[in-house]
Amino acid sequence: MLQRFAGPFKEFGFSAGLLYSIDRVLQGVSPSLRLYVYELMVQPISDTVLLPPRFRKLLEIREIKPGDPALTLLPIGPEICESRFVQNAVCLGAFQRGKLIGAMWFCPRAYEEDEVRCTYVVMPAEEAVFDFDLYLFPEHRMGIGFAGIWDGANEFLRARGIRFTFSRLTRFNLASRRAHAHLGWALVGRAVFLRAWGLEIMVATLFPYVHVSVRKSGRVRLVLRPDVLPR
């Protein structure tokens, strides 16, 4: 019992371990009670090739547009796909020998978070996107899939004049944090959301710092800027 209690603190550190434990207790009380802990990150779009030429040839990276049968292979429902395309989101797929092995999504200018009532606004508007929901099928997570899809994404975005991509990482997803650390990501802010049925309370390191909402329309806007990156 003691080891089970101490586990989150060993894995995440004291502060994050405490927040993780609170979230677990809240979920045990009701599925309508949650504590979301986010780290907001920025990554420069690099000119560096992430894969050697012989590996790049193994993957095809292309845009998956509305109505493409490949969308039905992703672990998201059609209504979610539709809501993303309504936001002008772009889906990039990674294919190996014609088979979809993974995908990631980008939104220009702003992205409406689907877990909490928050809209992320990226700056500079013409040079930044918000990326989300990078998914690789389990059998491809130990191969070239992660580096390959980012290699293709860098090329896709660079060709469109994009210099920065922002994302939010769940503080407790250590595997994702370690993977993104190799891509030159930098922290631009943190946000914690407490959801209690219809009530949501946000505390963040970005303006407006504290926000309370009781309706779906009461979304908070967080503006993300790449000021932390070296010039």
Image (cartoon, rainbow, N blue to C red):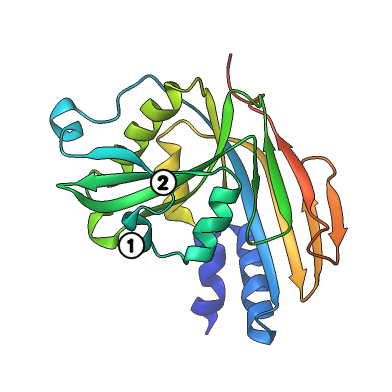
For this rendering, which residue is in front, 51 or 162?
162
* Left or right: 109, with 206 as reference point: left
In 3D space, how far apart are the residues under numbered discs 2 and 1 (Cα atoms)? 13 Å
Q: Which residue is mark 2?
A: 65
Q: Height in image: 120 above or below 22?
A: above
**Residue 165 in the image, given as x and y percentages of width and height:** 53, 33
For this rendering, which residue is in front, 59 or 9?
59
Q: Is residue 205 visible?
A: no
Instruction: Identify the residue at horizontal 69%, vertical 67% (top origin).
Output: 35
For this rendering, which residue is in front, 160 or 146?
160
Q: Which residue is mark 1?
A: 73
Quarter of the view holding residue 226: top right
Q: Amino acid at mark 1?
A: Leu
Q: Amino acid at mark 2?
A: Lys
Earlier-in-chain disc, 2 versus 1: 2
Instruction: Identify the residue at horizontal 64%, vertical 34% (top origin).
Output: 109
* Left or right: 223, with 64 as reference point: right
Give the quadrant of the C terminus.
top right
**Residue 99 in the image, given as x and y percentages of width and height:** 20, 53
